[in-house]
Amino acid sequence: MIFLRSLLFAIWFYLAMAAWGLAYMPAILMGHDRFIWHAMRGWGKSTIWALRWMCGVRVSFEGLEHLPAPGAALLASKHQATLDTVLPAQFVAEPVFVVKRELINMPVFGFYMKRGMIPVDRSAHSKALKDMMRAARLAVAKGRQIVIYPEGTRQELDAPADYKPGIAALYRDLNLPVTPIALNTGLCWKPSGIIRKPGHVTIRILPAIPAGLPREEFMARLESAIESESQAMLPPHLRRKQIP
């Protein structure tokens, strides 16, 4: 039964992406970029609805009082499932995501990733970092709020933390506070496969880390905040023995 429900959801998920994406595509092609986020929010709401009624997965948002004020900002999120990239548009007005470059080749979804997002070619190393910084400065100049996943890819619940240097570079260059986001989406939505287990997942926004800290201190505080809170939201038997 879980497999059939998960399969039904997977079909819904991609059909809804196509429907919302195609509906707003003409307006975006005419230069109305604000509809990028209308489409993202609509897809996110339909995903939350389908998770609840098809798979028995409830989604909660906590710590919304810690969200940055309107205007340029930097948010760093734990990454356990594709769901993590769909939900931020529900609480960030016009999020600009740092995404892997391969996504821009996807039908419909790639159209949106090319417009206003920050694609990164991870194989390009130093050039990728420079390109990311350049695009991030442009986004900040427009008052956008950048969402980055510091580990770069989806992680299993028990995987050791692996924070990449990109977030430290953005933190230093943009001179902005960083708002950490912890979550436990991996309880119901694994990094790979189509199975969606019933349960309750939470996205928790944490107090911001102030700008201007030394790199080592910033990275230690960011990793500690995200990992501690994310692990605390797991059942005891699934938590890592040691939290960084």
Image (tube, rainbow, N blue to C red):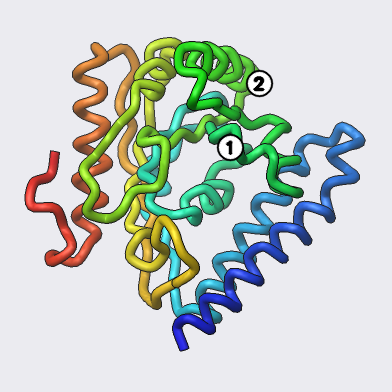
User: Given the image, on which type of amino acid does mark 2 rest?
Assistant: Lys
Furthest residue in direction left, as rendered: 241
| Left or right, residue 148 beside residue 244 | right
Of 169 and 218, nearer the camera is 169
User: Given the image, on which type of amino acid does mark 1 rest?
Assistant: Pro
Specify few, some or many for label 1: CA neighbours under 10 Å numbering under 14, 14-19, or 20 or more.
many
Q: Earlier in the sequence, mark 1 or mark 2?
A: 1
Residue 63 in sight: no
Q: Which residue is mark 2?
A: 142
Q: Is residue 36 above or below residue 156?
A: above
Residue found at x 55% / y 42%: 92
Q: Which residue is mark 1?
A: 95
Give x and y (percent) for residue 112. 72, 40
Q: Is residue 218 above or below residue 8?
A: above
**Count of number-bearing discs:** 2
Give x and y (percent) for residue 211. 34, 17
Residue 82 in sight: yes
